[in-house]
Amino acid sequence: MRSLVSRWVGARTDALAVNGIGDAIERAKMSRDTGVDAVFIEAPASIDDLEAIAAALPDVVFVANMVETGRTPLPTPRELSQLGFRLVVSPVTAMFAAVQAMQRALTILHARGSLRDDLDALVVFEDFTDLVGLPAIAEEDVRYRS
């Protein structure tokens, strides 16, 4: 049976922040030469850095790590593709948005004691239970209870 799991090996370097773009690119080349599937140079600080990274190794899959409010500019996936990046990750986008929403809700709760006038800032209870799978859990509870 064929596995549905795709396996690949990626190499990451944080050398750019410490040693500069040249050293980071050299490390990426060494990683490519070992046969990795993708290379990730952490924290390019400009479009020029992104262009230099892509131009230096056109024969490798480059990872663009898009962290909002981080050091790297935020080109669109199309713009990154045009630069030569083939794998784009946004590892903390949802968490950043969720934390901000929680802070806003808790600020209102603290100030007013209730969010009754701000229910549009909250998920509906039924949508939440569906999202976390509560109906399926309840079915399993009934199934295994007897």
Image: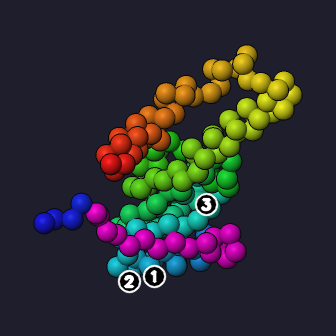
Residue pointed to by mark 2 = 34
Q: Amino acid at mark 3?
A: Pro
In the image, residue 90 above or below residue 28: above
Closest to the observer, 95 or 45: 95
Which quarter of the picture shows residue 20?
A: bottom right
Q: Which residue occupies the foreground of this view, 95 or 135?
A: 135
* Residue shown at 51% from the left, 33% from the top: 128
User: Marks 3/1: CA distance?
Assistant: 18 Å
For the view shown, which residue lies furthest in the top direction? 117
What residue would you read off at disc 3?
A: 44
Of 19 and 135, the residue lying toward us: 135
Q: Secondary structure at mark 2?
A: helix
Instruction: Name which residue type carries label 1.
Output: Met
Residue type indicated by callout 2? Thr
Q: Secondary structure at mark 3?
A: loop
**For the point 44% across and 62% down, which residue is it?**
62
Residues packed near mark 1 inside 10 Å, few (<14), some (14 to 19) or many (20 plus): few
Magenta stretch, residue numbers? 5-20
